[in-house]
Amino acid sequence: MIIRQTFLNAQCDGCGCEFDEENWYPKDVLDDVMRDANWKILGGRHYCEDCWRRDDNDNIVTSDGRKWTDGGEEIKD
């Protein structure tokens, strides 16, 4: 029997790098695998570990200058 499955990868919205150039993942596991690899998914955007950091208040700051709580809510200044 032949079945159709879709496998995905992700691209960083900060620098454009691919999450994993060698492996592709089913949609239902991709986000979990990315989080385990220290990627952040915030506001529907994906950030590799080089495109986010913690500020002095322990908030997440992404390479596009946006600030986020650990819960994924954007902080508006």
Image: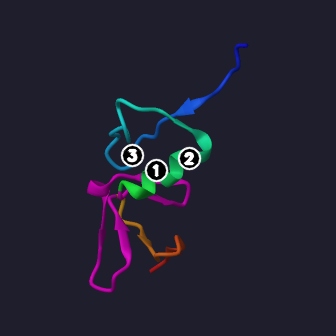
- Residue extending farthest front: 1
The residue singled out by tag 2 in the image is 29
Marks 1 and 2: CB-CB under 8 Å? yes
Q: Amino acid at mark 3?
A: Cys
Residue 3 relative to residue 26: left or right = right
Which secondary structure lies at badge 1? helix
Distance, label 1 to label 3, CA atoms, is: 14 Å
Label located before the other in sequence (2 or 3): 3
Distance, label 2 to label 3, CA atoms, is: 17 Å
The residue singled out by tag 3 in the image is 12
The quadrant where residue 58 appears: bottom left
Residue located 70% across and 14% down the image = 2
Nearer the observer: mark 1 or 3; the answer is 1
Label located before the other in sequence (1 or 3): 3
- Residue extending farthest top: 1
Camera-side residue of 76 and 36: 36
Residue 55 relative to residue 1: left or right = left
Task: Please name the colour scheme applied to the rendered image.
Answer: rainbow
The residue singled out by tag 1 in the image is 33
